[in-house]
Image (cartoon, rainbow, N blue to C red):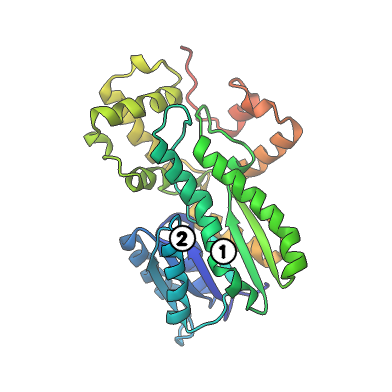
């Protein structure tokens, strides 16, 4: 798919981050887009930016849709809205981009949060692919673009557990690789691309807390503080009982800001890498130098990246806080 001009795309998680930038850049290239998210205010900003970026003439149509991708009924409604509002019987591109963090520990995290994270990050890919695959097959050429993560081949964070997110992203990776042969045999004009970003500057950490219904850091309840204390302690490299409530609040706030503000790659640059990969026809799109480094390190020595004192991790994440207990 050398050009997106005149094509029809669906983007999940279009209300912020990489999803928003995908919508804007696709519109700028003359591609009509249907974007969904649970954040309607964020979608409105996306739509405004996409309208400004789109070429004149009225051939590009961008629509926004409220949809929780973990809910199959909502996804089915979203698909029907796309067909109706774009007056189309096909789409060319499906970007399964929606994702949230949370459920870091299978041992200590609330079960509902774990399952919510897995349901969005993996269930959303499954539900949307089920719903939109017939429309992809109905096109003359189509591409299924699934966003996994470096956590789709490395099931951890820098000094932190990430069990729900990693399990989901491994599932996205495995599903996408399975679809290589499936589509080649059963729908050869449709292909799959697997996106594996490293650290990209988005508000996913901040937004995920809100989606899970957590209070803002300054307003956390005693129960929320207790849940956050373990994660904050792991990030700081100190025993949990050494952290005061105020230190826990500060740590939770700083995690989201650090992830957003210190990333080596912006969401806009990440979207450009993704779209360039789709154009060139590669099925495996690594996003960011850290993604390339972690991928190479995992292939070279799968045991090393799980060692607490891994020199590879120290090199890839130089800002990790590692303090002796």
Which element carries disc 1, helix, strand or loop?
helix
Which one is in front, 256 or 37? 37
Q: Quadrant of the N terminus?
A: bottom right
The relative height of residue 301 versus residue 71 in the rendered view (above or below) is above
The relative height of residue 187 versus residue 97 in the rendered view (above or below) is below
The relative height of residue 306 versus residue 203 in the rendered view (above or below) is above
Give the labeled residue for mark 2: 72
Mark positioned earlier in the residue sequence (1 or 2): 2
Which one is in front, 133 or 318? 133
Identified at 49% across, 43% down, the residue is: 263
Residue 148 in percent (x, y) is at 58, 49
Within the image, what quadrant is residue 152 found in?
A: top right
- Distance between the alpha carbons at the discs numbered 1 and 2: 9 Å
Identify the disc placed on residue 297: none
Left or right side of 209 for 165: right
Residue 282 in percent (x, y) is at 71, 60
The relative height of residue 73 versus residue 258 in the rendered view (above or below) is below
Q: Residues within 10 Å of mark 2 (few under 14, many from 20)?
A: some
Residue 226 in percent (x, y) is at 31, 25
Identified at 22% across, 36% down, the residue is: 219
Residue 249 in percent (x, y) is at 29, 30
Identified at 34% across, 15% down, the residue is: 241
Give the labeled residue for mark 1: 130
Are dots 1 and 2 in contact, CB under 8 Å?
yes
Identified at 66% across, 59% down, the residue is: 193
């Amino acid at each position: 798919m050398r050009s997106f001009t005149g094509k029809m795309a669906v983007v999940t998680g279009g209300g912020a981050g990489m999803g928003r930038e995908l919508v804007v850049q696709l519109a700028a290239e003359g591609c009509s887009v249907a974007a969904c998210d649970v954040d309607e205010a964020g979608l409105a900003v996306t739509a405004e930016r996409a309208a400004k970026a789109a070429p004149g003439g009225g051939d590009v149509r961008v629509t926004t849709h409220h949809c929780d991708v973990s809910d199959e009924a909502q996804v089915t409604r979203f698909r029907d809205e796309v067909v109706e509002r774009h007056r189309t019987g096909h789409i060319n591109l499906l970007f399964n981009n929606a994702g949230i963090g949370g459920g870091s520990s299978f041992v200590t995290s609330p079960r509902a949060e774990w399952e919510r994270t897995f349901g969005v990050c993996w269930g959303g890919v499954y539900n949307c692919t089920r719903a939109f695959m017939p429309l992809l097959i109905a096109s003359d050429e189509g591409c299924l673009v699934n966003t996994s993560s470096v956590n789709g081949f490395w099931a951890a964070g820098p000094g932190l557990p990430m069990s729900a997110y990693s399990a989901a992203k491994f599932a996205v990776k495995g599903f996408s690789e399975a679809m290589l042969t499936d589509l080649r045999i059963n729908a050869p004009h449709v292909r799959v691309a697997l996106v594996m970003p490293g650290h990209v500057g988005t508000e996913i950490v901040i937004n995920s807390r809100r989606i899970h219904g957590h209070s803002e850091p300054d307003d956390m309840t005693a129960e929320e503080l207790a849940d956050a204390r373990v994660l904050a302690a792991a990030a700081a490299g100190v025993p949990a009982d050494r952290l005061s409530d105020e230190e826990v609040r500060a740590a939770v706030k700083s995690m989201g800001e650090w992830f957003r503000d210190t990333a080596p790659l912006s969401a806009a640059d990440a979207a450009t890498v993704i779209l360039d990969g789709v154009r060139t026809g590669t099925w495996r799109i690594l996003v960011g130098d850290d993604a390339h480094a972690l991928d190479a390190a995992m292939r070279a020595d799968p045991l090393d990246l799980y060692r607490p004192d891994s020199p590879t991790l120290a090199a890839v994440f130089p800002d990790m806080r590692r303090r002796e207990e």
